[in-house]
Image (tube, rainbow, N blue to C red):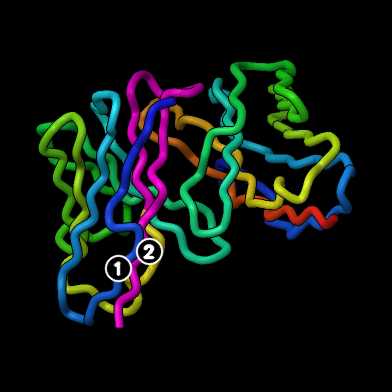
Amino acid sequence: GAVVSQHPSWVICKSGTSVKIECRSLDFQATTMFWYRQFPKQSLMLMATSNEGSKATYEQGVEKDKFLINHASLTLSTLTVTSAHPEDSSFYICSASRGAMGGNTIYFGEGSWLTVV
Amino acid sequence: QKEVEQDPGPLSVPEGAIVSLNCTYSNSAFQYFMWYRQYSRKGPELLMYTYSSGNKEDGRFTAQVDKSSKYISLFIRDSQPSDSATYLCAMPNQAGTALIFGKGTTLSVSS
């Protein structure tokens, strides 16, 4: 099946620094990638949708200047958490779409645990 | 009313039990319905998907959609300890631009 790779799988950073998380579709071209955030025992909350070559669309309440998303190619999207604070500590998950939404066209990465100390 | 509602549980059953997981949704325009399984500290993996109403079976898993009631179910037969995970229902939003997830039900199967 299709594989989406996320890196790093976990990261610890100091408050005030920036962290970049990569999401790659390994065996297909993803026209659209999605970034989710998940707090413990909570569901996945969509943060933003990114299309290759264009600006990301952010969900209401998500600070676009804090969570920078770049979708530079059809196989790579990055999420940069800028000036991270302890409240940004969370599980960040990307997914990639290889076709029209629905059925088995969405594939998820393994997630990245971010801890800000 | 939230677009997708799911009882977070937790749900604890003995090995071999039949498990029923459910979600309700509010938008009658939803057509695709997915169930994802998420193990602790891992990304979700697609378990099953159905289109429109009806049943779909895959091994020990059966997905059921009742569009008239806006109710979807996932049944697990002969549950195993390895089924212990969080199960999330999901469906594309009306614009078809993103997935909307339920809160997830945490299942624990004891041996």
Q: Classify the position of the N terminus of chain A by image quarter.
A: top left
Q: How far across and how far down the image is residue B93, in percent?
A: 45, 32
Residue indicated by mark 2 = A113
Q: Does the magenta stretch include residue B5?
A: no
Residue indicated by mark 1 = A11
Q: Does the magenta stretch include residue A94?
A: yes
Residue, x 65% and y 51% (percent of image)?
A: B85
Q: Is residue B64 above or below residue A47?
A: above
Three-letter residue code for mark 2:
Trp
Q: How crowded is mark 1: few (under 14 residues within 10 Å), some or many (20 or more)?
A: some
Q: How far across and how far down the image is residue B1, in percent?
A: 59, 47
Three-letter residue code for mark 1:
Val
Q: How crowded is mark 2: few (under 14 residues within 10 Å), some or many (20 or more)?
A: many
Which region shows up in magenta? Answer: A93-117
Residue, x 33% and y 67% (percent of image)?
A: A114
Q: What element carries label 2?
A: strand
Pointer 2 chain: A
Number of numbered callouts drawn: 2
Residue, x 22% and y 73% (percent of image)?
A: A84
